């Protein structure tokens, strides 16, 4: 199971380790134009399949206030959907710095999602 970015094809970003040509399996790049329901579905899918995946977290990576807004709304929608499965998600926000394709330093907010049982 591979969780991929929503929206258009992801742009490669330079990171300290080199150029990232594909995103990690547990990372979703959130854009301002992403549909909340689609993002929420990815979070729900991750939560329900967590026992079968190689990683135990899902990272929602956001650049810009509008992308952060979409990610937060998606987490709220996912929480409501997961209630019937006796699951919940907890997020841990952190910042990371990347170099974009125009060699500009960009700060992004990453919302790390953990699944808990209720």
Image: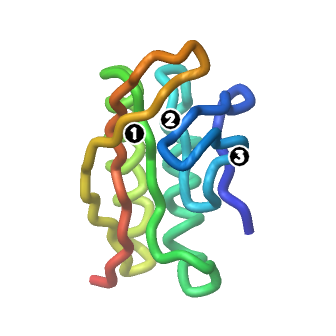
Estimate the spatial distance between the alpha carbons at disc 1 and disc 3, rounded to whole Å.
21 Å
Residue 61 to residue 99: above or below: below
Q: Earlier in the sequence, mark 1 or mark 3?
A: 3
Disc assigned to residue 103: none
Q: Earlier in the sequence, mark 1 or mark 2?
A: 2
Q: Which residue is mark 3?
A: 22
Badge nearest the viewer, 1 or 2: 2
Structural crowding at the residue carrying mark 3, measured as other residues with C-alpha within 10 Å and reported as few (<14), some (14–19) or many (≥20): few
- In the image, farthest residue toward the front: 17
Residue visible at 47% across and 22% down in the picture: 32
Residue visible at 66% across and 57% down in the picture: 3
**What is the secondary structure assignment of the residue under circle 2?**
strand
Asked whether 68 or 18 is in front, the reply is 18
Structural crowding at the residue carrying mark 1, measured as other residues with C-alpha within 10 Å and reported as few (<14), some (14–19) or many (≥20): many
Residue visible at 27% across and 65% down in the picture: 90
Quadrant of the snapshot with the C terminus: bottom left
Q: How many marks?
A: 3
**9 left or right of 71 in image:** right
Q: Which residue is mark 1?
A: 71
Residue 79 to residue 28: above or below: below
Estimate the spatial distance between the alpha carbons at disc 1 and disc 2, rounded to whole Å.
7 Å
Badge nearest the viewer, 3 or 2: 3
Disc assigned to residue 30: 2
Residues at circles 1 and 2 in contact by the CB criterion of under 8 Å? yes
Query: Residue 96: image x %, image y %?
Result: 34, 42
């Amino acid at each position: 199971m591979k969780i991929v970015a929503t929206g258009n094809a992801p742009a490669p970003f330079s990171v300290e380790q080199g150029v990232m040509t594909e995103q990690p399996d547990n990372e979703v790049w959130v854009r301002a134009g992403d549909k909340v329901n689609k993002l929420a579905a990815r979070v729900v899918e991750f939560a329900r399949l967590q026992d079968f995946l190689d990683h135990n977290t899902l990272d929602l990576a956001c650049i810009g206030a509008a992308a952060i807004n979409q990610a937060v709304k998606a987490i709220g929608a996912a929480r409501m959907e997961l209630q019937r499965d006796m699951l919940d998600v907890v997020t841990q926000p952190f910042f990371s710095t990347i170099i974009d394709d125009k060699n500009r330093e960009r700060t992004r907010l990453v919302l790390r999602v953990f699944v808990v049982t209720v």
